[in-house]
Amino acid sequence: MENSKQMRTWLDDMKLDHPLVIAGPCSAETEEQVLRIANELKDTDVNYYRAGIWKPRTRPGMFEGVGALGLKWLQKVKSETGMKTCTEVANAAHVKLALEHDVDLLWIGARSTVSPFIMQEIADALEGTDKIVLVKNPVNPDLALWLGGIERLYTAGIKNLGAIHRGFSTYEKTKYRNIPEWQLAIEFQNKFPDLPLINDPSHITGNREMIFDVSQTALDLNFDGLMIETHFDPDNAWSDAAQQVTPSKLIQIMRDLKIRKESDTEAGYNTELSNLRAQIDVLDSQLIEMLGKRMKISDAIGALKKQKNVAVLQSNRWNAILGNMILEGETKGLSEEFVLKMFKAIHQESINHQEKIINS
Ligand code: PEP
Ligand code: MN
């Protein structure tokens, strides 16, 4: 992925020699809990201390956060440990209180990004602030909503902006709590290459065992940082217990992650890379060429079916093709998921072609 960052941002100004790290509990529970976790994180690479004060919970009756009281605890974190702090804001009243209590970074949660009215209310309340404001992706995989949220803040004169990729909810059961849909995050980066993009493996995985792998994938994709929920007693956390790690586990994760450079100026590397990319370009052209040929054959089949007044969709034939291709793909190291997705797309295009012919 080419990434041509041109503008200096708040993140460049921090001059970090590692990706940005935001860590702390999902929720502020008690003053002791907030301070204890902060103390365990203060002499590490963690750059911002997070704690949710107002918690958007799916069902009523669950712990909905300690509210404004927690802002006092975050102030204490700052004065006792020197750490910068951050929290989620979801309406104008939250913004006002967070600014009054000098929270350093505010983020907008996935359930707020889905609502243009709420986004506008928050943008108006933040107007002209020099605080850092990060926008989480909306819960549903809708790139335009995410971009729109950023645009509303930018239009309100908020210059220190960034985004958080926290995955997308899906009705299907998957190994993730929120599926990453990495392609969407990459598209986001392409639209706003200068905007710092942080990954939130906690909310993507919902499971502390998978946090390392998702974090590494994010760094491999040039993400600028990570937000990882951290608690000294994750299992007894008042929210998101399964996905929080202990401070020592977080330190271990940070130590084990491989940080890749965006590029390298060494000549040998560049020659080798251009050579490999040239090979990919040739293969990509061949793929397009072959798909074009395949569609021409589909067109001929469409014409035949039209003559005999036969339906376009023949499920048996299609299932046989799919089964064979999945098996063949396996021998070439292609995952079933990929082969399935690719052939569904090819099949859909074939159907579109044949429909056009039959109805012509
Ligand atoms: C959170 O960060 O604790 C949170 C509620 O996140 P999200 O908005 O991504 O669900
Ligand atoms: Mn959480």
Image (cartoon, helix red, strand yellow):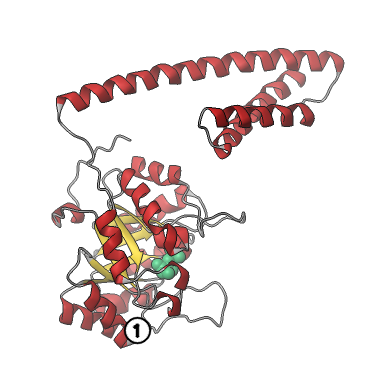
Label 1: element kind: loop
Q: Which residue is mark 1?
A: 68
- Of 50 and 125, nearer the camera is 50
Which residue is rendered at x = 48% and y = 82% of the image? 63
Which residue is rendered at x = 83% and y = 13% of the image? 307
Horizontal side of residue 147 vs 140, given as left or right:
left
- Of 323 and 105, nearer the camera is 323
Please tell me in which quadrant of the rendered image residue 356 appears. Answer: top right
**Residue 103 at what x, y percent from top left?**
25, 74
**Residue 236 at what x, y percent from top left?**
44, 80
**Residue 349 at what x, y percent from top left?**
63, 27
Q: In which quadrant of this rendering is ligand 1 seen?
A: bottom left
From the image, which quarter does the C terminus lie in? top right
Which residue is rendered at x = 39% and y = 72% of the image? 26
Residue that lies at the very extreme toward the right in this rendered image: 308
- Amino acid residing under circle 1: Ala
Classify 48 as above or below 7: below
- Of 201 and 128, nearer the camera is 201
From the image, which quarter does the N terminus lie in? top left
Classify 84 as above or below 211: below
Tell me: is circle 1 under 8 Å from ligand 1. Answer: no
Which residue is rendered at x = 80% and y = 17% of the image? 305
Residue count near mark 1 (Cα–Cα under 10 Å), binned few <14, some 14–19, many ≥20: some
Is residue 59 something that shows in the picture?
yes
Is residue 240 something that shows in the picture?
no
Classify 304 as above or below 54: above
**Residue 44 at what x, y percent from top left?**
19, 67
Please tell me in which quadrant of the rendered image residue 164 appears. Answer: bottom left
Please tell me in which quadrant of the rendered image residue 184 appears. Answer: top left
